Amino acid sequence: MLYSIFIYGPEAEVASWSPQQENAVVAQHTAVRQKLTEAGKVGPVVRLMPTTTAVTVRNGAESIVTDGPFAETKEQLMGLYVVDCATLDEAVAIARSMPWGTFEVRPVHRFFPGSALPEQG
């Protein structure tokens, strides 16, 4: 089954990191990604640009587009992994191995066959 691991954290904290801190966190994520790649368990991994680059589209009777993230929160969605795991516990263990942040683990439902994601069992 595919699981998403959403990475949340305060953007201001990340923006304040020194180049050495940034490189250390990236190196830790690189190690996690490499281990998952070797095990054939990783799909897309992305780091999102800051929320200042985002727009929000609210659909309803009239479509409205506004600047910024969809909600006022102390933590922002910073990026995500898609992993192929046998169980939720395995996906949670992967999230626990990651450096820095708060992680939301959620099963992924594939709508479109033939995408770059592996077939689900």
Image: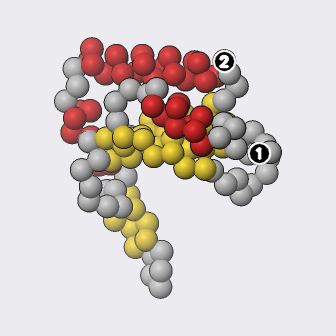
Using the rendered view, name the quadrant where residue 17 is placed. Answer: top left
Residue that label 1 marks: 120
**Residue closest to the eye, 50 or 91:** 91
User: Does 91 appear above or below 98?
Assistant: below
**Residue closest to the eye, 56 or 22:** 22
Can you say which quadrant of the picture contains the N terminus?
top right
Count the numbered circles shown: 2
Q: Residue 82 at what x, y percent from top left?
A: 59, 39
Q: Counting other residues with Cα less than 10 Å from the Cα at mark 1, is it few (<14), some (14-19), or many (20 or more)?
A: few
| Secondary structure type for disc 1 | loop
Residue flagged by tag 2: what amino acid is it?
Glu
Upstream in sequence: badge 1 or badge 2:
2
Residue flagged by tag 1: what amino acid is it?
Gln
Q: Residue 97 at what x, y percent from top left?
A: 46, 26
Using the rendered view, name the quadrant where residue 24 is placed. Answer: top left
Answer whether labels 1 and 2 touch (C-beta < 8 Å).
no
Q: Is residue 82 left or right of residue 10?
A: right
Q: Is residue 2 left or right of residue 12?
A: right
Q: Residue 117 at what x, y percent from top left?
A: 71, 41
Q: How is the image coloured?
A: secondary structure
| Secondary structure type for disc 2 | helix
User: Does 79 appear above or below 28?
Assistant: below
Residue pictured at 75% horizontal, 39% vertical: 118
Residue that label 2 marks: 38
Residue pictured at 37% horizontal, 52% vertical: 54
